[in-house]
Image: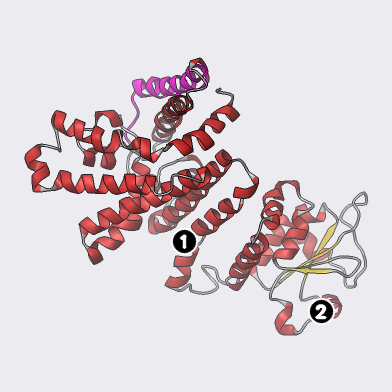
């Protein structure tokens, strides 16, 4: 593609279509002095030329004459110039190209949503303002690194929220969960620092795309992994099969009028198949390949203390994220107890976004649930909790049941079950 751009660029405005059978649609103009722009032209050049466009640098003499822009404005953004003289710039140019590329449909959908084009233009301006910076071109300030680390998370969440008016509630739930997941994956990967830079590329891709955990340093490190035992493979596959049976068989046998019962049984099946089964199987695959991928769930029902439940047995990925993103930064400033409560409240707000927002009801219940978890953990660690024996044995197990188990009905509240999860089960063909 680079050879084509160097040796097939017209010196005039003559129409040169990419293929004889493709109608000529104009020129895609980019900053030829920008490394990022040249790389983008090489990567996507075949895609746009096959659709009737010719790629040209903005620095060509004929381009300057045709656009008639001041020198200070010429290179601020890419342009698309059509044969009839229409000019599109920046995000509008990308949208013009996206209309001709089938897999770019998310861009077209986002542009039609309220505030969508504003978001696209803002994101384009942000990238364009930093396009001349690279590891060799210029040094990035700590503020720039923070933006690059954190920006994808809110941007993805806002994009998912904008889908709300046009998609079913269960699709919005998964869109929000996916946005938070992808944003946090990027956040933790960026934070891995030197470990990330030294790790092979396949490990980084595996962490970002094929591992649900959030401990990038552990996954990308060279630390030896614990080899899986044969019985673990059987257990993981068995949990996946059991979860599928619960979803597609047990839910069908229940009275369909018992909506809450059907929803809760379906959630048990989904947890068994996905979280307990598939995630365990992924851990086995990565550990078999020599990667340190600790299982995210370890028989939560066996916890004998609330600290054991949240710290080791239930969703280690979320615990790692809360520890590194909330507890560790706040603990030196406000103390470990307040930082612990802040971490649980932040978890509650995230669950409120994923659970209550799609349901359009039950706001605050997930946050109240996680606030209760923080208070219960502080009680367990207090002198009174030690005297009551809340950290071990049968009393500890009952305390976990009372604080984390039974109140889960408030976490996954009835409006969520009725309007989000049961329609999701129906979409799966489970009911």
Mark found first going from the N terminus, 2 or 1:
2
Task: Name the residue furthest front.
Answer: 257
Image-based side of 328 in relation to 179, left or right: left
Check if residue 356 falls in the magenta segment: no
Q: Front-most of 231 and 155?
A: 155
Task: Name the residue furthest left.
Answer: 387
Image-based side of 23 in relation to 346, left or right: right
Q: Which mark is residue 395?
A: none
The stretch in magenta equals 226-252
Q: Quadrant of the N terminus?
A: bottom right
Q: Front-most of 52 and 330?
A: 330
Q: Front-most of 97 and 14?
A: 97
Residue 238, horizontal then vertical, whole percent: 42, 19
Find numbered disc 2 in the image and state the secondary structure of the residue it sits on. helix
**Can you identify the residue that label 1 sits on?**
149
**Can you identify the residue that label 2 sits on?**
64
Residue drawn where x is 22% and y is 44% of the image: 376
Residue drawn where x is 57% and y is 71% of the image: 130
Find numbered disc 1 in the image and state the secondary structure of the residue it sits on. helix
Residue drawn where x is 24% and y is 34% of the image: 402
From this view, report whether residue 375 is shown above or below residue 425: below
Give the alpha-carbon distance from disc 2 to disc 1, as whole Å: 37 Å
Residue 135, horizontal then vertical, whole percent: 51, 68
Residue drawn where x is 71% and y is 76% of the image: 75
Predominant secondary structure, magenta span: helix
């Amino acid at each position: 593609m680079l050879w084509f751009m160097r040796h097939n660029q017209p010196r005039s405005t003559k129409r040169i279509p990419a293929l004889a059978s493709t109608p000529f649609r104009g020129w895609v103009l980019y900053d030829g002095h920008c490394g990022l722009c040249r790389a983008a032209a090489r990567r996507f050049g075949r895609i746009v030329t096959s659709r009737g466009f010719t790629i040209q640098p903005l620095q060509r003499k004929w381009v300057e004459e045709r656009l008639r822009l001041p020198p200070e404005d010429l290179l601020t953004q890419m342009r698309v110039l059509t044969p009839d003289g229409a000019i599109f710039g920046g995000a509008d140019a990308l949208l013009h190209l996206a209309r001709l590329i089938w897999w770019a449909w998310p861009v077209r959908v986002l542009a039609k949503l309220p505030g969508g084009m504003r978001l696209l233009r803002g994101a384009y301006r942000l990238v364009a303002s930093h396009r001349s910076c690279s590891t060799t071109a210029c040094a990035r300030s700590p503020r720039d690194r923070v933006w690059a680390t954190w920006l994808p998370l809110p941007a993805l969440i806002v994009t998912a929220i904008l889908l709300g008016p046009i998609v079913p509630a269960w699709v919005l739930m998964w869109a929000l969960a996916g946005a938070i997941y992808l944003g946090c994956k990027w956040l933790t990967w960026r934070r891995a620092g030197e470990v990330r830079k030294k790790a092979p590329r396949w490990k980084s891709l595996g962490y970002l795309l094929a591992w649900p955990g959030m401990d990038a340093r552990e996954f990308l490190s060279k630390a030896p992994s614990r080899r899986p035992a044969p019985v673990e493979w059987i257990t993981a596959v068995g949990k996946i099969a059991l979860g599928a049976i619960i979803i597609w068989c047990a839910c069908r046998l229940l009275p369909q009028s018992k909506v809450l019962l059907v929803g809760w049984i379906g959630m048990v099946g989904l947890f068994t198949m996905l979280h307990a089964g598939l995630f365990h199987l992924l851990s086995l695959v990565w550990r078999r390949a020599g990667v340190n991928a600790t299982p995210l769930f370890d028989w939560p029902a066996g916890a004998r203390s609330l600290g054991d439940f949240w710290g080791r047995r239930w969703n280690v990925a979320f615990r790692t994220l809360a520890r590194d993103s909330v507890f560790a930064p706040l603990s030196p400033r406000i103390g470990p107890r307040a930082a612990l409560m802040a971490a649980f409240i932040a978890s509650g707000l995230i669950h409120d976004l994923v659970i209550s927002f799609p349901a359009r009801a039950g706001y605050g219940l997930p946050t109240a649930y996680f606030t209760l978890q923080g208070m219960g953990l502080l009680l367990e660690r207090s002198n009174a909790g030690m005297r009551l024996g809340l950290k071990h044995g049968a009393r500890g197990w009952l305390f976990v049941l009372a604080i984390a188990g039974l109140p889960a009905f408030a976490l996954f509240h009835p409006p969520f079950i009725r309007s989000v999860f049961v329609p999701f089960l129906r979409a799966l063909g489970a009911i």
